[in-house]
Amino acid sequence: MIQEVKEENVALMKQSERTSKIRVKDLSLFYGDKQALYDVSLTIEEKKVTALIGPSGCGKSTFLRTLNRMNDLIDGVKINGDILIDNEDIYKSNDVIKLRTKVGMVFQKPNLFPMSIYDNVAYGPRAQGIKNKKELNKIVEESLRGAAIWDEVKDRLKSSALGLSGGQQQRVCIARAIAMKPDVILMDEPTSALDPISTLKVEELIAQLKKEYTIVIVTHNMQQAARVSDKTAFFLSGEIVEYDVTNNVFSNPKDQRTEDYVTGRFG
Amino acid sequence: MNARKNFDKNLQELQNKMLEMNKLTISAFEKAFTAFKTQDIELALRVIDEDTAIDNLDQEINQFAVWLIAKEQPFATDLRRIIASLKITSDIERIADFAVNIAKATAKIGKTESLMNITKLEQMNETSLKMLNMAVSAFIDGNMAFAKEVAALDDIVDNAYAETYKSITEYLRQHPEETTQLVQLLFISRYLERTADHITNIAESAAYLIKGQIYDLNQ
């Protein structure tokens, strides 16, 4: 029995090496003197949804933000270890723009610009130098369709994006992210400010998006992690306690700390 | 602060209801077998009547478990505990039905001179009751050794069933005039054999709770 489980794990590991999109090795992160991540190693698979869970302050958002170098903007941050996306060390290259084109991000609260829906989605492509009206129209429509919001906004593309409901705004944020044709989409608690129906719509969307994108999502909602993700990593005090197929993490976790967290005994 | 005090209280309540149902079932079983042994038809009829209380508890536990799943959306051990409770409850309910069947067979045999000494029914009954106590303890205390012991005891019941079947059919060939009673005895041995299988299922549910894996102890 134990032998079988070992073989199964080895097979899974081999499979994940073949299909890995992001490989993180011995990542440590310091905010000044305070260490926030301790030797984190993790392989994220291509076109899968990986959920990061853990109590507040466990380092999961910090970890997420290292994947497109968002932490570079904070003073006094020091990072050790390697993060490879498509076998390229993202901290060895200086082209952060290229990295953020490849790795998009959606935040906790919708953060649309105070401009029209159309201009919000076209913002990134325009910044990349695309000026052709027809081409922009195509990108905007495809992105809004991809984010499952096209039918709701197609008749008011020129009106302010801030007039939309929170749930709609969040899906436009996702459209804005996919307009850049990224490979990876990072989501930091994307539904924590949304009502239940809007939440379900975003979750449905995530299931659609994973056919084309690799998704990493931070969530405090355990049921959401169970519903949307293929694999789940449990963070505690800056370390990964358990990283496994989502089903295992929620129905039969191996580590007592994971058990205690998912059953609400702390956190 | 324990953020899940209420949930823990509810889980305890679920377990208490299950234990109460188990207690009633053991009592029904003991009464049914005593009625059979002493040919006490009144006692047998009482077992049949009292089964309604067990059926009601079964329904109550089912509804409570469904409500707990809906409102707590449980994970890990909590989820396995509730699922195991649901399965165990329906096994206990079936066992109580077998007690009723034994009581009905007792009523059919009536006051004819008992032929139970040609069978191993007494041994089957004793072993089954021992198994039931162990299986439920395995669940309550998370005792994996008990769950495995139950599976071993089930083999004893299976063997006693095979021997009983053989001796009843042999006796029947020589004493066809005893057919009515012998058929009922054969039924009772079958009920006891099935009871032991359901108890083994309970041990499997306990093992599922403890280890998080599906076990087949009914081999």
Image: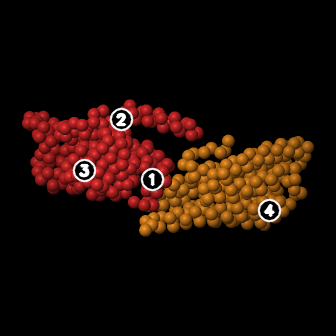
Cα distance between the residues tagged 1 and 2? 24 Å
Could you classify mark 1 by the number of other residues whose Cα lies within 10 Å: few (under 14), some (14-19), or many (20 or more)?
A: many
Disc 2: which residue: A20
Residue A50 can be seen, yes or no: no
Amino acid found under the numbered disc labelled 2: Ser
Residue A201 vs residue B178, the one in the foreground: A201
Disc 1: which residue: A258
Could you classify mark 4 by the number of other residues whose Cα lies within 10 Å: few (under 14), some (14-19), or many (20 or more)?
A: some
Cα distance between the residues tagged 1 and 3? 29 Å
Q: Are marks 4 and 2 in contact (CB under 8 Å)?
A: no
Amino acid found under the numbered disc labelled 1: Thr
Disc 4: which residue: B34
Amino acid found under the numbered disc labelled 3: Val
The residue marked by circle 2 belongs to what chain? A
Could you classify mark 3 by the number of other residues whose Cα lies within 10 Å: few (under 14), some (14-19), or many (20 or more)?
A: some
Where residue A77 is drawn, which disc sits there? 3
The residue marked by circle 1 belongs to what chain? A
Query: Can marks 1 and 2 be said to lie on one chain?
Result: yes
